[in-house]
Amino acid sequence: MTQFTQPDQHALDTLRLIGPAPENWVPPRDGIDHNVVIVGGGQTGAAFAFALRRAGIGQVSVIDAAADEGQAGVWLNRARMNKLRTPKSLAGPEAGLPGLNFQAWYEARFGAESYAEIDRIPRTRWAEYLAWYRHFLEIPIRYGTRLTRIEPAGEHFRLHLEVRDGTAVRTVVETARKIVLGNGVAGNGGPNIPAVLKSLPPALLAHTSEAIDFAALRGKSVAVIGGAASAFDAAGTALEAGAGQVHLFARRERIASVPVTRTRAYPGAYDNYFHLPDAIRWSQARRFRHAGSTPPVDAVERVTRFPNFHLHLGAPWTHASVRDAQQVETHVAGESFAFDFVIAGTGYVVDLALRPELAQIAGHIRLWRDQYVPAASDSDDALGAHPYLGAALEYLEKVEGDAPYLKNIHVYNPAAFVSFGLPVGDVPSMKRDIAAVVQRISRDLFLADLDAHEARIHGDIAADFDESVYAQSVWQRDRADVA
Ligand SMILES: Cc1cc2nc3c(=O)[nH]c(=O)nc-3n(C[C@H](O)[C@H](O)[C@H](O)COP(=O)(O)OP(=O)(O)OC[C@H]3O[C@@H](n4cnc5c(N)ncnc54)[C@H](O)[C@@H]3O)c2cc1C
């Protein structure tokens, strides 16, 4: 997939000019396997690994439950759009180094003219770029390794891991001082399956987060539930795969088309969002929920050009039953429909209780509903379930002093949305939030070993030169008179 034969001179020059990565400065500790474990080997995991390396923090391990790199992340599996939804000009995982960014990579292969011509980044090109990034920077990712439980153990964590090797699965426990959760859109919850769909069997229903056999939908009638980008992407993929009829059902009377978060896409608001008062952050999150998540216009146009695509507005499903074990029946707005397959493009929920790896600690984590009580007219249970995070995206304690280890878990996934105003993990978050987390990890690891560092910075050090270098010029009155 990656075109390694192409010139990467700009990238090579970048690495040459920034010089070698610093030595690991974190003193080893008995019984500690990793200073940092990054859970998730998608774009986030790779970008953190590089940023931590450049910060001189060693003993970092990136794990991913996926069997291999093609199945990790979303870009070659669950993402079904033709182009990224985000602008091509955003900073990505390059840590501020232009020679490692998407544009440099793309122009080295396809030319500056071609880059100027693309309006947004083609999805598969982004996946190729990320694969190149991982390989070029030699970032090791341990695939087939799933975190199943975080067990606090004083100053560190015991991480329970399920490691797959072919069909064999073994369980191991490794220790780590810091955790970064780069575990994706469902990383603090799961797919949102509306109650009305919950009783449908998997043969008739899939959520967009799952692998879907679109070829099997050829000639079939398909219902897609949801009005945001993933629903339109799934409908488009089904239509292009030859589905007979595709009906998309949206609750809203109009498809959301007002990108309200764009009002804060300027440096002041972007950089300082965390420091806004809770009431403002809450009302911003509410405003977004009210306006809805907007699909890009090309995702809508991708489906509307098909005569066998039908859009139902103001059409929530309230009923669904299985007919002859083969079809799903429903009644919407007084009409009856039968479908061969239903796709839920209904997004994700934040609910810490859904994550097995958080089971032991979830009850101690401060949520927005613990912190902020909005007016009744402004209440929102879904937003209230989001963790109320600290400045480095770390969990905070529900009860102060109860679970001090929580500050060592950094949440780099969309559960940080209410606290940070962005779906964290998406490209727009990378520039601001990776740097903030790495800076905090560095600070915490440094201060945790203050004695060792104090000894090191007070330590003896050899002189760069001796007195002979300047001895002949030292002022001496008697010699000056002679001169
Ligand atoms: C359909 C779709 C379209 C999107 N489009 C865009 C877009 O256009 N622009 C944009 O900026 N963002 C978009 N996003 C958001 C997108 O998820 C992020 O940009 C990007 O994938 C985030 O990368 P990540 O590495 O944080 O998470 P992911 O790419 O989701 O990777 C997370 C990884 O964590 C692993 N993992 C999860 N749990 C565990 C565990 N317990 N143990 C070990 N490993 C685990 C998973 O296997 C996965 O590989 C889209 C998301 C989806 C679902």
Image (cartoon, rainbow, N blue to C red):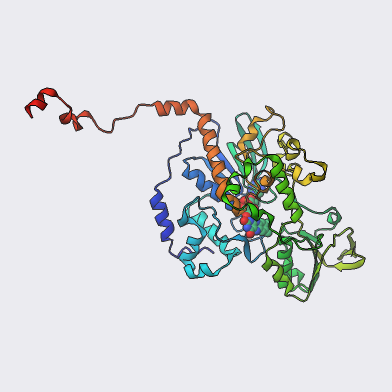
Q: Residue 44: x, y in percent?
A: 58, 50
Q: Residue 274: x, y in percent?
A: 63, 42
- On the image, which quarter does residue 338 sit in? bottom right
As drawn, is 124 to the left or to the right of 338?
Answer: left
* Residue pictured at 60% horizontal, 30% vertical: 155
Q: How many badges with numbers are in the image?
A: 0
Q: Residue 209: x, y in percent?
A: 71, 57
For the N terminus, the image quarter is bottom right
Whether residue 402 can be seen here? yes
Residue 449 vertical placement versus 11 (above, below)? above
- On the image, which quarter does residue 211 sit in? bottom right
Asked whether 295 or 466 is in front, the reply is 295
For the C terminus, the image quarter is top left
Q: Residue 444: x, y in percent?
A: 54, 33
As drawn, is 383 to the left or to the right of 416?
Answer: right
- On the image, which quarter does residue 301 sit in? bottom right
As drawn, is 395 to the left or to the right of 30?
Answer: right
Whether residue 142 can be seen here? no
Name the outermost residue toward the top.
478
Residue 454 vertical placement versus 292 (above, below)? above
Asked whether 269 or 13 is in front, the reply is 269
Residue 294 vertical placement versus 472 (above, below)? below
